[in-house]
Amino acid sequence: MELWLLSNRLLILRDYIVSAASQINAGGGSNGFNPTNLGLTDFSLVATTLDTNNAYKFMSGIEGMDRFGTGPIRSSYFMLASTELQSDFDALVGQGVLNNWNYPSNASALPSEWGSVYNLRILTSSEAPVARNAATNNLGVLNDVYYNTVLGKQALTHISQDGYSMNLIYRDPYYSGMLAQNATLAVKFAQSQALTQDTAIRNLLSTRLSNLGV
């Protein structure tokens, strides 16, 4: 029950960021929609915007190594994007975009990290916000709009309430039911999330270039 509540609280925070943070429409793509699909200039523009707002980057750079097919990584902000855009990111590989497999060392790569482009490291999730059929081109064709949230380090914070620390609760099957069939595992904590500096957040809105095969 507690894990379900945690998931829903994170979704509420996600939606709050979408509604509260400023937006930049992608214009570097070629699909004829407004916003367009993501182009290299869009990644550069949103990073430049956060740099101008004196946002702090999450990750330091990774120096290049003598390994075939790899490249150095700049100090970076995080961008949360939908897993539905991964095929678009794949199409940009070799044009300044690196998949995490091509990092000089992927020891610092997060499990959800797709790769890096300029001063952004891209995390993908199926829970990233999408507005279905929200964009139309001049032929009347509809396309989904993706909210790619780019964060500086000081944009968000976690607040522990009343000094209450997290507790992991486990009860073995003997204590969880008369038939001793199911164990109980839960996390209990008093914590909230808050936006601390909205100038360190930008929602980079884009559509998709490739057709989604689902």
Image (cartoon, grey):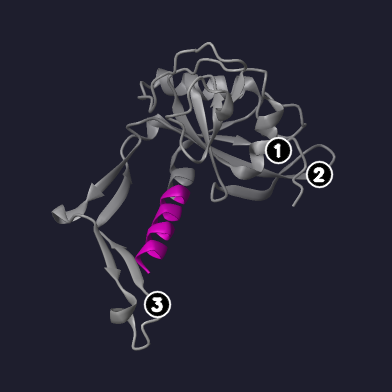
In this rendering, would 162 be left or right of 208? Answer: left
Start-end of magenta stretch = 1-15
- At horizontal 34% and vertical 67% (from top left) the residue drawn is 185
Marks 2 & 1, CB-CB < 8 Å contact: no
Residue 46 is situated, as x and y percent measured from the top left of the image, at 52, 25
In this rendering, does residue 37 appear at all?
no
Q: Which mark is residue 141?
A: 2
The image quadrant that residue 63 belongs to is top left
Furthest-left residue in view?
Answer: 163
Does label 2 or label 1 sit earlier along the sequence? 2
Residue 73 is situated, as x and y percent measured from the top left of the image, at 49, 18
Which residue type carries mark 3? Answer: Asn
Q: Is residue 6 magenta?
A: yes
Q: Nearer the viewer, mark 3 or mark 1?
A: 3
Residue 102 is situated, as x and y percent measured from the top left of the image, at 58, 23
Q: Is residue 134 above or below residue 101?
A: below
Which residue type carries mark 1? Answer: Arg
User: Mark 3 highlights which residue?
Assistant: 182
Please tell me whether mark 1 sits on a helix, a strand or a loop: loop
CA neighbours of label 3 inside 10 A, class few (<14), some (14 to 19), many (20+): some
Does label 2 or label 3 sit earlier along the sequence? 2
User: Mark 1 highlights which residue?
Assistant: 208
